Image (cartoon, grey):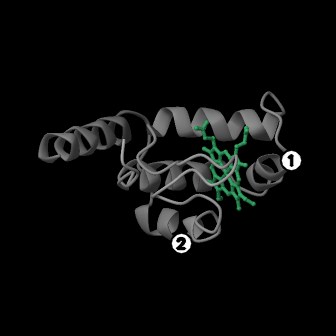
């Protein structure tokens, strides 16, 4: 578990330093709208766990919903209401959250 955390922190810092610096406070604030559906502990119905998701994958997924490459009514409307900066902040925040499911 310790090494997992170290890995995640390196990955996030590496990613942030590489292309952008994301605002974790903004991410945490915006994430309140997601947590009702996306739980850290378990997949709820068709709703996946996004805690601990790789930031690059996360951003790609959000842009795919926004641009219609991924079709899901809920996520398409969520994604279209967010700016690029919002998506980056959310990706950075979720990437350092722990996926609490028993895997
Ligand atoms: C009303 C419930 C609901 C809310 C609110 C919601 N989501 Fe989702 N989200 C879903 C569902 C359902 C899916 C799976 C959609 C699919 O099958 O493509 C999903 C998929 C995703 C995925 C893709 C995950 C993967 O593994 O590919 C991401 C990323 C995501 N949501 C981010 C967010 C963010 C960020 C927010 C808040 C701004 C949010 N969601 C709010 C229901 C929700």
Residue drawn at x 53%, y 60% as measured from the top left: 39
Q: How far is disc 2 from disc 1 in space, using C-alphas?
A: 23 Å
Residue drawn at x 76%, y 38% as measured from the top left: 65
Residue drawn at x 53%, y 55% as measured from the top left: 90
Relative image position of residue 1 (x, y in whole percent): 17, 46
Relative image position of residue 100 (x, y in whole percent): 37, 55
Judge the density around disc 2: few (<14), some (14-19), many (≥20) Cα neighbours within 10 Å. Answer: few
Mark 1 residue element = helix
Can you say whether 32 is above or below 67 in the image? below
Relative image position of residue 96 (x, y in whole percent): 35, 52
Judge the density around disc 1: few (<14), some (14-19), many (≥20) Cα neighbours within 10 Å. Answer: few
Q: Which residue is mark 2?
A: 29
Question: Where does the C terminus fall, quadrant-wise?
Answer: top left
Nearest to viewer (mark 2 / mark 1) = 1
70 sits to left or right of 54? right
Q: In the displayed image of the protein, which residue is found farthest to the left?
A: 2
First along the sequence among labels 2 and 1: 2
The disc placed on residue 73 is 1
Q: Quadrant of residue 64?
A: top right
Q: Mark 2 and 1 residues: CB-CB less than 8 Å, in contact?
A: no
């Amino acid at each position: 578990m310790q090494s997992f955390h170290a890995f995640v922190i390196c990955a996030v810092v590496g990613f942030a330093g590489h292309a952008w610096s994301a605002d974790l406070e903004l991410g945490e604030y915006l994430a309140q709208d997601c947590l009702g559906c996306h739980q850290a502990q378990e997949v709820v119905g068709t709703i996946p766990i996004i805690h601990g998701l790789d930031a690059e994958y996360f951003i790609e997924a959000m842009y795919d919903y926004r641009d219609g490459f991924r079709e899901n009514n809920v996520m398409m409307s969520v994604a279209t209401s967010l700016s690029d900066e919002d998506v980056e902040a959310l990706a950075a925040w979720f990437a350092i959250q722990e996926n609490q499911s028993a895997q």
